[in-house]
Amino acid sequence: MCGIIGVVASTPVNQLLYDGLMVLQHRGQDAAGIATAEGNTFHMHKGPGLVRDVFRTRNMRALPGNMGIGHVRYPTAGSAYNFAEAQPFYVNSPFGIVLGHNGNLTNTQQLQEEMFRLDRRHINTNSDSEVLLNVLAHELQACAHGYELDVDSIFQAVAGVHRRCRGAYAVVAIIAGYGLLAFRDPHGIRPLVYGANETEAGVEYLVGSESVALDTLGFSVIRDVEPGEAIFIDLNHQLHTRQCAQQPVYSPCIFEYVYLARPDSVIDGVSVYETRLRMGEHLAEKVRQHIPVSEIDVVIPIPDSSRPSAMELAQTLGIPYREGFVKNRYIGRTFIMPGQSTRRKSVRQKLNTVGEEFRGKRVLLVDDSIVRGTTSREIVEMARAAGALKVYFASAAPPVRFPNVYGIDMPTRGELIATGRSDEEIAAEIGADGLVYQDIDALKTSVRELSDRLSSFDASCFDGCYITGDISPEYLDEIEAARDGAPKKDREDGGASQQMHLNLMSAE
């Protein structure tokens, strides 16, 4: 997953983009970047690390312009620490374009070959986002009237991207001299929402990964970008929208509701917070079936994203809810950390127990999901060390048994603790006295109850059903072999960042 944002305003957008990326920081902590447009010139700064570390005052001053895009990166394809893959990406032919992408293309290798053999375009990194940028650039060239674009040709180019690209993609891009373009894949796997702000100088527009970016920046949400839809905001601040896919289907990633999105976001018309409450309600019924309620003295969440589910579970079962873990917010999320040894070391730095809530009690720990099991095992050990008599464990999500190929850096099947193990074996592996998983149907119902529009989801990491229809066992074998064989690289750029000022006059 990554976080993307695009802004068209009447005043400089550098501060808006920075503030928006800070709000979306949870979607990517590996790198950050901003590109702004000033006439036919792009200004760009990007680098590895958190938003607050990448941008200094001098960098912000060097980002003039009333239109821009931003990106926070969580690597899912390519090298985790290759600075060249930080976004936005830029291409100058035939039109200057900067682009930020959230998701993952599943036919990257095929597209790379087409780029070289047919389109005569050079791909400089292993990033699928650079591939997507070049596909868009080629389609714009094919649809242009000579070297001139209009709204119709831009939307035709997006339709060409949909025909060629497979997988998940939510995109923001600026075409030099024309405006801001945003679009979403035909299944709507990754989220994208846009809104407006009325000012004395005219209407301003913002598009981003989550509604929380609009809320905090004072923009009113208009709606989510539909699957397959593109929106284009021209230099006169005119908004144009068009459905560019032939057979779009609403199938958002259900893991956004489980873990990825902030609880105060609304995705595809559904409150993430309310969804997590429903997950807790359904999970409570499953717990009641497997663990005598009288055997549980207290319900304790594993912060942060499991809190709503844990609160609702406790209330439904009539069991006290307590905060038993204190989180150090200055430690990176373990789900994102690159090495197993680093991840194991970080858990105790990240969480500490409140001993009084565990001592002499039978506790039910609630987490949003269990992926590798490393964190769960450490947390169970911490609970026992704090004096818990028994430690039960409940997951608000079903067992994660399959890799995610649509933009979440899930481990290989061999690293997933649920692969090939029963619930009892997983409980033994993490050291719990009992383990309860959410049912997949209950998880989907938690979202469906809040929207009549959503009936299909990408839940591939739980059920192995890949909705794009192009994922084979051989494909999974290939990506896992590549993952296992790729050595972990140290940061080659030594924390370096990059400032670019590019003259983007269209070719003539």
Image (spheres, grey):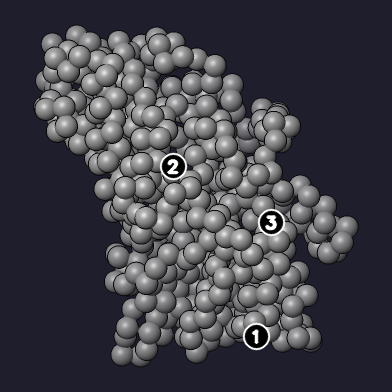
SS category of the residue bearing label 3 = loop
Q: Amino acid at mark 3?
A: Cys
Q: Earlier in the sequence, mark 2 or mark 1?
A: 1
Q: Callout 2: 10 Å neighbours few (<14), some, many (20+)?
A: many
Q: Callout 3: 10 Å neighbours few (<14), some, many (20+)?
A: many
SS category of the residue bearing label 2 = helix
Pick the residue in front: 44 or 432.
432
Vertical placement of residue 486 versus 94, above or below:
above
Residue drawn at 37 percent across, 37 percent down: 443
Residue 333 relative to residue 176: left or right: left
Q: Amino acid at mark 2?
A: Phe
Residue drawn at 52 percent across, 27 percent down: 401
Q: Which residue is mark 1?
A: 150
CA gap, disc 2 to disc 1? 37 Å
Q: Which residue is mark 3?
A: 165
CA gap, disc 2 to disc 3? 22 Å
